């Protein structure tokens, strides 16, 4: 780690076989430091649980009032396939597994309104076509 010491504790550890992951709450004590970088935490937690650092996903961190302690959520996937399957797209973008697609606000609104006009079983097909059309722009 860096020049100042950081203590990392995990609690509420749970093995989740349906989602092929381990999940826990992470408490970080970092006195005299504003915050700890996510990449540094991934390395340390990956080492603690004998897994690859890129399979560790950290999110939802809040620093306690007055600083010095942060609490967040950690998920460690068994495989990269499980990570890609179960993690939301925005977190995959944060981790560097996917690229963010830029869409205009107008294209998103047009796709939404086009999908609202069709009812019944054709609605999901129409929404899919509208989404593809918005992505092609």
Image: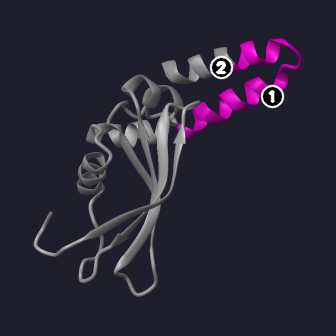
Residue visible at 29% across and 75% down in the picture: 30
Answer above or below: position of 133 versus 10.
above
Q: Quadrant of residue 57?
A: top left
Question: Which residue is at the front of the view, 131 or 71?
Answer: 71
Please, what is the dominant secondary structure of the magenta stretch? helix
Residue visible at 23% across and 56% down in the picture: 40
Query: Residue 31, how many percent across, how many down?
Result: 27, 82
Residue visible at 80% across and 18% down in the picture: 123
Q: Which residues are magenta?
A: 104-127
Query: Residue 45, how many percent across, how many down?
Result: 31, 52
In magenta segment, residue 137? no
Question: Which residue is at the front of the view, 53 or 62?
Answer: 53
Q: Would residue 57 be found to the left or right of residue 4 on screen? A: right
Which numbered circle lies on residue 116?
1
Q: State the SS at label 1.
A: helix
Answer above or below: position of 127 versus 50.
above
Q: State the SS at label 2.
A: helix
Which numbered circle lies on residue 136?
none
Which residue ends up furthest to the bottom in the rendered image?
66
Q: Would residue 114 be found to the left or right of residue 80 on screen? A: right
Answer above or below: position of 112 versus 71.
above
In magenta segment, residue 109? yes
Query: Residue 17, how many percent across, how many down?
Result: 55, 32
């Amino acid at each position: 780690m860096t020049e100042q010491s950081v203590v990392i504790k995990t609690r509420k550890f749970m093995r989740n076989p349906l989602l092929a992951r381990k999940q826990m709450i992470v408490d970080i004590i970092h006195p005299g430091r504003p915050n700890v970088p996510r990449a540094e935490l991934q390395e340390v937690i990956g080492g603690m649980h004998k897994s690859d650092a890129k399979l560790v996903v950290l999110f939802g961190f809040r620093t306690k009032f007055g600083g010095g302690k942060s609490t967040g959520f950690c998920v460690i996937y068994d495989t990269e396939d499980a990570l890609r399957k179960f993690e939301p797209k925005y977190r995959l973008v944060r981790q560097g597994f996917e690229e963010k697609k830029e869409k205009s606000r107008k294209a998103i609104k047009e796709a939404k309104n086009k999908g609202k006009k069709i009812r019944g079983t054709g609605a999901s097909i129409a929404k899919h076509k509208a989404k593809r059309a918005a992505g092609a722009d």
